[in-house]
Each structure stands twice: as structure tokens, then as C-alpha cells.
Image (cartoon, helix red, strand yellow):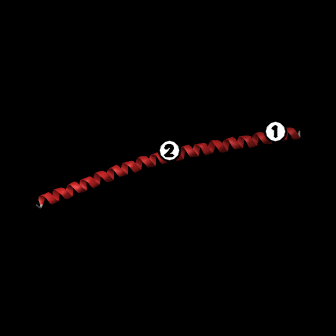
Amino acid sequence: MKSIIVVVAAAALAACGVETATTAATVAAAKKKEIEQGKGTLNQVRQNLDKAMEQTQQSAQRTEDATK
């Protein structure tokens, strides 16, 4: 009887470990996706800033050319 209880307890603990590992893997995959999306957003913001900066420089150049 004691050996059955030990086997059942060991099986329950093993299942708990598998669940914990699965949860950790799921969280890691979600974080990886979140980081990739953040990098995409960062690249998009940089591109938009570069375009805005270029437009500002062009506008300043046009204003300078018009005042000459």
C-alpha cells in the first residue's frame, strides 16, 4: 500500500514539473514574439523620424533658397 502511495505521489510531482516546464516555454515564446513586435515598431518609428527629418531639411532649404 505504501509503495502505491509513493508511486502515485511521484507521478503527481512529475506531472507538476511537466506543467511548469510547458508554462515556462509558453511564456518564453510569448515574450519572444513581444520583443520581435517591439523591434518592428522601433524600426518603423526610426523610418518615420528619418522621413520627418528629411522633410524638415528640405523645407528649410526651400525657405533659404526663396529668401536669396
| Residue indicated by mark 1 | 7
Check the picture and name the quadrant holding the N terminus.
Answer: top right
Farthest residue to the right: give it: 1
- Front residue of this view, candidates 39 and 12: 39
Residue found 52% across the figure and 45% down from its top: 32
Side (left or right) of 49 relative to 55: right
Residue found 32% across the figure and 53% down from its top: 49
Query: Which residue type carries mark 1?
Result: Val
Measured as percent of width and height from the top left, residue 48 is found at: 32, 51
Measured as percent of width and height from the top left, residue 42 is found at: 40, 50
Query: Which residue type carries mark 2?
Result: Lys
Check the picture and name the quadrant holding the C terminus.
Answer: bottom left
Q: Residues within 10 Å of mark 1 (few under 14, many from 20)?
A: few
Farthest residue to the bottom: give it: 67
Residue 33's disc is 2
Q: What element carries label 2?
A: helix
Total numbered labels placed on residues in the image: 2
Side (left or right) of 4 relative to 66: right
Residue 49's disc is none
- Front residue of this view, candidates 25 and 9: 25
Earlier along the polypeptide chain: callout 1 or callout 2?
A: 1
Measured as percent of width and height from the top left, residue 56 is found at: 24, 56
- Front residue of this view, candidates 13 and 66: 66
